[in-house]
Each structure stands twice: as C-alpha cells, then as structure tokens.
C-alpha cells in the first residue's frame, strides 16, 4: 500500500466518529440514509437506548434538500424526535425504519412552527429527515432523546396556526395582544420614538428599549410603502416578536434569528400605515429588549448570511476572505475568531479527501462550515470528539473551497488553530 493510500485509509478510519455520511450502509432506510449523519458522531455513539443524554446536531437545508440524522435503538425505547428551525424556519420531519417505512411524520407539533413526535421504537436503525416546509433554505437543530430527557421544543401536541383575521365569523376572537403602556396599538402600548419612518431612506429607522414587563407591544407608522427589518435584541431575555397590522391581522413572527435575538424581514413593501410588534421574553421578562425598525437592506441581509455562515461569500473580493491558494498536505493557520464568520479559501488541484479541524483549547465554542465555489454546503460541524471543537471531512474535486469558522455564542471571541490536511488517492 502506498504512502498516500495509507494516509487516506487512516484519515477515513479516524473519521469514523465524525458526523459524516454513512456511505458504508448503502440502501439504509430505503436509500434515504445513504447521505445521513450519525447523530452521536458514530454508529457506536448513536444508540439512544443507552445514551447518557439527548443527541443533537445543527442542520442546514438548502435548495429543497433534506438533512438526515441516523440513530440506533438497542432495546425497546420510548423515543422523542424533534426539529427546531432558526430565523423563522419551518421544519418538517419524517422518521423511517431501516427498511424505509415512515413510522412518524410531523410539521408543527413542537410549537412555534417546530416539529416533534414521540413513540415506542423497537431495536433497529432509524433515519430522521428534516426538510423545510416551503423549500426555502433553513438552519435548525435536530434532536433525538428518550422521553425522560430534556426536550428541544415546547411541544403543543398540535400545529400552532397564526391568529385568524377579524371578520363576521371571528367576532369572539381577540387577535391583538393586550398590551401595557399607552400608544397607537391600543390602550397601554408604547410607540417607537422618532416619528414616522421614511420608507424611501434605507436604514433610516427608529428604536426603543424596555422590558416585556414594562411594554408588551410597540407601535410604529410607515409614512410610505416600505420593506422593513424589525429586530429585538437581548439574548439573555430571548425575545420573540410577532408583527400585526393595525387591524390585528397577523403578518409574521420570529424567535431566534441571530443567536437568541429575533428579526423579521418584510422583503415585500408594507403599505403606509400603523403596525404593532407584540413582545414576549422566553427567558427573562424583566430584562430590557431593544426593538428597532429600519428600512430593509437586501445587501445587509446578504452580508448577514455570510456572517452567520448560512451562505458562502463570493470570491470576487467584495467580502473579506483569507486566501491560502493551492492546499498542501498539511497547513496550519492561527486566527482569532468572533461570533462573525471568518472565511478562508483554498484550492484543490486533484480529487481526494480534505480534513479541517479547529482547535480552541477550551476557549469558546467554535463552529465550522465548508462550501464549494458554487456556494453549496459540503460539510458542517459544531462539536466533535467529546469537546466543543469542530472537525469536518469531505471528498473534494478540483476547484476552490471556502471554510468558515466562528464562535457559536454571541459576543464571544478567542484564538483558534485551523489545521488543514489533504489526502490523495494512490496512483
């Protein structure tokens, strides 16, 4: 066996515990599991019957695809499966047995648009797939647990549709929240300072700060039709915002968009008039939350996706990327990262395997994504090998690839050492 063959075999062996595609099990779950990832990092670590805690993966779904998590059951077990979307994502889950039969499906039983299901499972291998309800790109979390372990979602047991609009058949409904304060959204609400928002000036907006105990609804007025962005910021309070028009018609809501902060982007212009933002704090209602309304900026929204790693930046120089050039067999790069994604590009001139690892030595909690030059997500990872450091491995072909690394927690910074290892097939 040649040196390069040995290196490739060792790399593949070392990665048996990575959340990597289960390619060795062709046809698993009727073929759905062929590109799945062991939710515990490896098949041996993915037995929910014996797991000391729940098992969870961060998932990214693009272009109408699905994300598949694999797990096993070694003895009859009451199992809970869940998916929670971020940034307004609406996940749908299907649970299949090893033969591909769907044994459980759900859309909104987790509450707030999230998915959840519980059932007794017999010993075997199972595939939990997550898709986006409307086919749009979505980031979320998938969790498998026993019913006595912590749940990911609140679990309503039934979908939570938006409030119905007022009308002759809904006279007994009260779609608008009952606010405290005193403003345009009804008795007791508070208006955002700064007067009407000029929808023609992108970024020119208004804001206000108060706890949910003080104000449960904020009002604002558009002087002209405008696409707007609404944010609520204080991760320690974990804000949830819901947008209504002045008649109480439900328009949109969001919980976690950027970490635990919330954001609603109304990309289609709202009509001129008055609007109300209903406030909830899922962690601490006594903490102040800053609520802002500004003109929607599509370029800023796109840059936000780059900063969070939800999309890869272009290679035209319009966004900062550290360029390594042709990747050697072993390359080390030391960087200091924040909660904004740092991007590094490298070139591959021969098909093979690439392993990228971020070592933090316990400073922070880095996460990592790997994209090809067309903007397709190749691999991602948060925690690998029993600690908080990520590792990704992927087969690569000739071309340029981008690695993004950032801290998972808001406001966190810390140094990391990035190790790139490249393996090529024997000739």
Image (cartoon, helix red, strand yellow):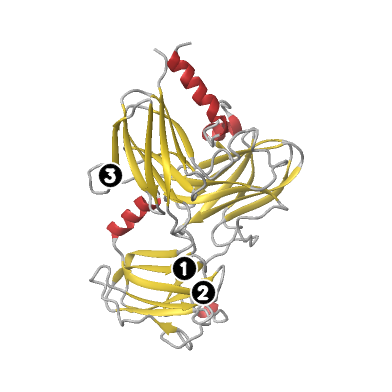
Q: Residue at x 51, y 80 (%)?
A: 168
N-term-proximal mark, 3 vs 1: 1
The reply to whether discs 2 and 1 touch (Cβ–Cβ < 8 Å) is: yes
Q: Earlier in the sequence, mark 2 or mark 1?
A: 1
- Mark 2, Cα crowd under 10 Å, few <14 / some 14-19 / many 20+, is some
- Residue 164 visible from this viewpoint: no
User: Label 3 to label 1, Cα distance in Å?
Assistant: 31 Å
C-alpha separation, residue under disc 2 versus residue under disc 3: 39 Å
Name which quarter of the figure residue 173 lies in: bottom right
Q: Residue at x 65, y 52 (%)?
A: 117
Q: Distance between the residues labelled 2 and 1?
A: 8 Å
Q: Which mark is residue 287?
A: 2
- From the viewer's perspective, is residue 424 above or below residue 320? above
- Using the image, determine if residue 160 lies above or below residue 93: below
Which residue is denoted by mark 3 in the rendering?
314
Residue 271: image location, x then y, percent: 32, 74
Q: Count the marks: how many?
A: 3
Helix, strand or loop at label 2? It is loop
Neighbor class of circle 3 (other Cα within 10 Å; few <14, some 14-19, many 20+) is some
Marks 2 and 3 close (CB-CB < 8 Å)? no
Q: Earlier in the sequence, mark 2 or mark 3?
A: 2
Residue 24, image quadrant: top right
| Dot label at residue 324 | none
Q: Is mark 3 on a helix, strand or loop?
A: loop
Residue located beneath label 1 in the image:
234
């Amino acid at each position: 066996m040649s040196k390069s063959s040995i290196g490739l075999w060792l790399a593949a062996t070392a990665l048996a515990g990575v959340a990597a595609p289960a390619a060795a099990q062709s046809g698993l779950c009727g073929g759905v599991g062929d590109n799945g990832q062991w939710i515990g990092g490896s098949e041996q670590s993915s037995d929910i019957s014996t797991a000391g805690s729940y098992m969870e993966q961060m998932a990214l779904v693009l272009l109408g695809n699905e994300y598949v998590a694999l797990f096993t059951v070694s003895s009859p077990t009451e199992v809970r499966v869940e998916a929670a979307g971020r940034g307004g994502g609406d996940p749908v889950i299907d649970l299949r047995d090893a033969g591909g039969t769907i044994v459980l499906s759900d859309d909104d039983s987790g509450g707030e648009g999230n998915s959840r299901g519980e059932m007794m499972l017999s010993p075997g291998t199972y595939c939990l797939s997550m898709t986006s309800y409307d086919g749009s790109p979505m980031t979320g979390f998938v969790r498998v647990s026993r019913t006595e372990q912590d749940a990911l979602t609140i679990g309503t047991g039934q979908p939570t549709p938006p409030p119905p609009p007022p009308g002759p058949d809904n006279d007994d409904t009260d779609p608008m929240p009952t606010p405290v304060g005193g403003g345009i959204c009804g008795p007791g609400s508070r208006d955002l300072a700064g007067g009407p928002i000029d929808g023609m000036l992108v970024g020119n907006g208004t804001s206000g700060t108060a706890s949910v105990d003080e104000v449960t609804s904020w009002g604002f007025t558009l002087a002209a039709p405008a696409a707007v962005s609404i944010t609520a910021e204080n991760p320690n309070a974990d804000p949830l915002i819901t947008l209504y028009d002045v008649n109480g018609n439900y328009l949109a809501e969001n919980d976690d968009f950027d970490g635990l902060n919330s954001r609603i982007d109304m990309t289609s212009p709202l009509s001129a008039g008055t609007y109300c933002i209903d406030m909830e704090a899922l962690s601490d209602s006594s903490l102040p939350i800053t609520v802002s309304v500004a003109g929607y900026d599509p370029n800023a929204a796109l840059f936000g996706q780059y900063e969070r790693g939800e999309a890869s930046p272009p290679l035209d120089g319009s966004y900062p990327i550290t360029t390594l050039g042709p990747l050697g067999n072993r390359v080390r790069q030391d960087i200091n990262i924040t909660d904004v994604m740092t991007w590094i590009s490298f070139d591959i001139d021969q098909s093979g395997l690439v392993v990228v690892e971020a070592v933090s030595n316990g400073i922070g909690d880095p996460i990592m994504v790997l994209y090809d030059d067309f903007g397709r997500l190749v691999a991602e990872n948060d925690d690998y090998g029993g600690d908080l450091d990520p590792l990704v491995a992927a087969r690569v072909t000739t071309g340029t690839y981008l690695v993004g690394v950032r801290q998972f927690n808001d406001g966190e910074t810390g140094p990391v050492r990035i190790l790139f290892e490249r393996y090529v097939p024997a000739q």
